[in-house]
Structure formats: C-alpha cells, structure tokens
Image (spheres, grey):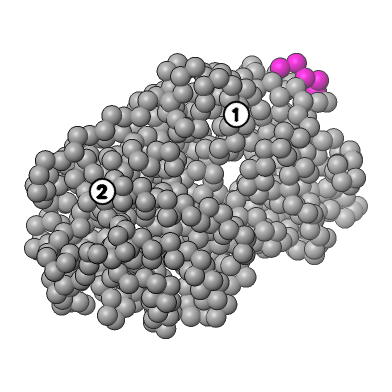
Amino acid sequence: MPEFTVGKAEFLLDGRPVRLLSGALHYFRVHEKQWDHRLAMLRAMGLNCVETYVPWNLHEPAPGRLHEVEALGRFLDAAHAAGLWAIVRPGPYICAEWENGGLPHWLTGPLGARVRTSDPEFLGPVERWYRRLLPQVAERQIDRGGPVVMVQVENEYGSYGSDQVYLARLTELTRECGITVPLFTSDGTEDYMLSGGAVPGLLATVNFDSGARAAFDTLRRHRPEGPLMCMEFWCGWFEHWGGKPAVRDAADAATALREILESAPGASVNLYMAHGGTSFAGWAGANRGGELYEGALEPDVTSYDYDAPIDEAGRPTEKFHLLREVLAEYQEGPLPDVPQPPPVLAAPVRAEFARWAPLAEVVEALGGPEYAAALPPTFEELDVDRGLVRYRVEIPGPRAPFPLTLTGLRDVAEVYVDGVRVRTRGGEGSGATLTVVEPVAGPASVEIWVESLGRVNYGPGLGESKGLTGGVLHALQYLHGVRARGLRLDAFDAAAAVAGLPFRGTPEAGGTPEAGSAVAEGTPTPDGTPTPGGAPAADDDGSRGLYRAAFDVQDPGDARLDLPGWTRGFVWVNGFCLGRYWPSAGAQESLYVPGPVLRAGANEVWVLELAGRETGAAGVPYVRLAGRAGSGPSGE
C-alpha cells in the first residue's frame, strides 16, 4: 500500500516528493446526491485532494444519540472514487461558521469556558465521540487503500487557548483510535497563535488570504523544517445577516494562489472554500463584532457560497477558471473536462398557502415539556440547540406603570403584554438588554418569544448560552415564577407529528378570524393549561405560525426560493430544511433548493414564520421557486 509521509521540506508519497493541491468541501453542506458532481468539479479545477471538517453537534444531538455518523465514511468513499486524496479535520472544534463551532450545546452549556481544555468533563465526551467516529477514518487511510492522507488535531487552537496538556492528549487519543497517517495543526500567522496551537512533533500549517511569503517566514521561525502548507487559503469569505456581500476579486485570488505555490518547492495549499455549499437546517453560526469579539452578534446567513470558485449551486465562476489556469501549471497532464452544471427547475412555480397553524399551537404540539423556575432557563437547560423558547411570567398588581426590561437576551425577542405585541428598544452586545418602550402596569401577563440566531463559532464567546440568560425586571424587581417551553427545529423532522398539527384555513384564504389567529387569552391548550397573552398582536395580525402548501413540479432541478412578504423564519421542502430566511435583513434574499429535494409530481413546502408577515403584505401568502442559474445567495 502507498505510504504518505512528512519530509524535511516536502510531502512524500512512497519517498517521492508530492504537492497537495486541496480544496475544502464540507459533506454536511452539500446534498449527498450532489457529492459526486462537486467532487468532479474539484478534479476539473486541478485539485488532487479534498478537505472536510466533521461537525460533532450534527452527529450527536444528545449524549449518546447518534445521527448519520457514517456519512463521513460515505463521503470519503466518494472522494476516493473521484480520484482525490482526503484531509480530515475532526475537531472536536471546527469553527467553520457552524453553530457553536461544531461543539454540542449539551456540553458547552454546563462547561462554559472549560471546553477545549484538559478538563476531564470535556475530554471524557470527546474520547467517547472519537472512539465512535475515527475508526471509519482509520480504515480509509492511504496505507489501507483509502484516500485519507492527513488528519488534523484540534483547529486553530492558538486563537483560543494554550493548554498543551489538552493538545497532547488529543494527539494521543487520535493515535489510539487507529490514525497512522501524519497529524497536523493549523493556525493563523500571528506568533501567539502558532506558539499556542502547534504541537511538538506534528506538522504545523498556517491559514491566510494573501502574503504567502511573509506567512511562511513566520511559520519557519516556529518550524525550521517540514513542508510549507496553507491549510486555509481564504479565496473568498462568509456573510452576515445585515452585512455587506463578501466578494474577493478573482484575479487577486489567482495571484495570491500563485504566490503560495511559488513560495517554496512543493508548497501546498487547501482552497477554503473550493465549494462552500449551504448551512441547511439552521446550522449557521455567528461571530461577535469588535476587536476582542465582544460586541453585537453577527449571525451568518444560510448560504455558505463564500464567493468560492464553485458557487453554492455547484457552477463554475470566473474565479474557478482563473484558479484552474494557475493549477493547470502543476499538473502532469491535461485537466479533466469541467462537468456540466446540474439541471435547474424547468418552469417557475408559485406555491400558495391555504393552511396554517398558529405558532402557539405549534409549540404546544411539537415543543418540549414546560419548565417552571424562579428565573428564566437558558436554551441549554431546555435542551434546545436550534429553535426558539416561549417564556411566560406574571407582573403582580395592582401597581403603577414601570419599565419592563429583559437582561442577558440572546438573541432576538418578540414581547407581548396581555396578548398585544409591544415595541422594544436595545438588544445589542454580548449581554443584551431589551426594554419595552412604554412602561407597563400590573397586573399583567407577559409572554416573551426568544429565537437563537446561531451560537458563536469563533473567539471567547464560544459556547455562550442562548435565551434569557439574565432575567425579567419590572423597575428594579425581578419577576420570578417563569414558565418556559422550547421548540427545537429537529421537532419538524417528524413528518407525522407535523401532519397532525391543527392546520386551518389562513385568513387570506377564507379562514375565519378565529381560525386564523393565535390562541385567545385563557383558551385551554392541548395540555389543558390556560394560554395568557396568546391573542394575536395588532401589528402581525396573528400571522406567526407554520404555513403549509402543496405544489406540482414537472421537471425537477436546482432552484431558488423567494419569500415575498415574509419576515424571518425557516423553510422546509418535502421535509428537508433549507434553513433560515430573513430577506429584509440583507445579504441573502432567497434560499437554495437542491434539485434532489424536489420530485416530479406533488411536493410540499412549509414556512415557519416567527416574526409575523410584513406589514402591508396583501393577498394569499405564497413562495416562488425558479430555476435561476445565477450564483451567490441572492440568486441574481
């Protein structure tokens, strides 16, 4: 079997120098039926290797409850069949603009800053996870006839910590799990990052977007020997809701790639991203603004197009062709032909929603158990990874009007007092405070709906809790006796449970006002408890809830889904969650629909509207699917 090793200056395959021309492609951000096409695109661009992270929280949503762990092995098999080597970066932390940096909420919630350290309460679950995950990597190593040539230890650890005991144990654990190929670390180009994240005896690599010679000079100060590799060549960038589109000039990226490859004999590269894909199902992460990453939340959009050479829909861009010209100079023969783009939806479709279920009833039917405590529980305490939480609390009375304040809010909230949605101000920063604009008198019933926009995936805010992490204040008095119920996004994975919701006609489709509104105050819910504050708010016309529509397709294919008149929420097509929509925020206007999700004939779409449809949105609510061939999250 072949042997891949780390030489003094270059990578070696059976003792002969070899250069890694790799591209990042995350199997979990691409529909499995499209893996082969995307991998063929990498080969056609001139790459000989694919790199992927592994998101722990996707595969272990609850302690010991595993989900699709074998997907990694299937992806590595697909890479091998495509003629590519593979680099695996198993974490346990991955960053990746992914929810919580890939760490499970059930672990970061109780541990906080003790994650990514040698604390036994962190390393214990990591060990159990690695012993389940890594055998499928071990059996696919190059020395066993597979594609895997290298495996990473941790990820950009020098940007976070300096626990060398932790890194040493993670290295040892990786070897114990059968990994024999070279191990490596990757870090930024600051000295403190390399000194904190590099592991003695392992290959150290660096991440940057330009300035290869200066970056490699810094690496050489820390590692005089070993192959030079940019493990993340940032040829594009990610986008935030409300932010500006991220665009990197294609010619500039090609020039920077050439500098990497010309920096030293055998200098290697991993394009981050070669193909970004999509953060389906609400798995997009977030950053915090400011120099020290302690400012306002900057949640990532659903698209992970990344301005990559292969766009979100798998099509070649100008950047693809310019990078391909550079990479072609490092090939022994002609490059494969560029694959044909995937088919697009042949004719546009308009799906109109005649049925819906109010959000309060959705929570009662699909939410977790109600939790009662003196102070508001966090999302983690309610076992909610992605989704929302409804908090209820009473203001005693009689009492005069006083300010009503929510402290430690993460991330956004809709507030109702006696069933009427009220205006609020504030809500910025890592420990946000939100105040109701008009003072509130007592007695009154308060209902607070809090939505997570994605957990922080980079910086000291990693693992911070979601929800009302402080309390509810009336003047200076904490309001105790809080009831809370969480709604996880994966509750919608149970199609039978969704079908059993109390759908009724939307008001626009001829439903009665009573049927088209949220639950009226005092109306018993399915579990028999009254629902104070459940009446529809005047400014959203009771339009928060789950909408359901059927539509027909003759010739399925890739599509973009537009949501005119909708505000913020999530979309499913045939039970597949496309992710969060928030068109009014900016940066992303439509959602990518993978062709394999659609089927010839009857299809179904659900829209979970969490903020109320836009003021002035007239007519029957609808979404529109079209087979636009444009690249990028806007689909233009």
Position of the N terminus by quadrant: bottom left
Residue 288 visible in the shown view: no
Considering the numbered disc 1 on the image, is that residue within a helix, a strand or a loop? strand
**Which tag, 2 or 1, sits closer to the chain's start?**
2
Q: Is residue 405 left or right of residue 15?
A: right
Q: Is residue 406 above or below residue 493?
A: below
> What secondary structure predominates along the stretch shown in magenta?
loop
Q: Residue at x 56, y 37 (%)?
A: 576
In magenta, the rendered stretch is 509-513
**Looking at the image, which is closer to me, 518 or 312?**
312
Position of the C terminus by quadrant: top left
Q: Residue at x 61, y 32 (%)?
A: 607
**Looking at the image, which is closer to me, 265 or 463?**
265
Q: Does 510 lie within the magenta span?
A: yes
**Looking at the image, which is closer to me, 139 or 10?**
139
Q: Residues within 10 Å of mark 1 (few under 14, many from 20)?
A: many
Please give the label number shown on residue 83: 2
Q: Which residue is mark 1?
A: 605
Which kind of residue does numbered mark 2 sit on? Gly
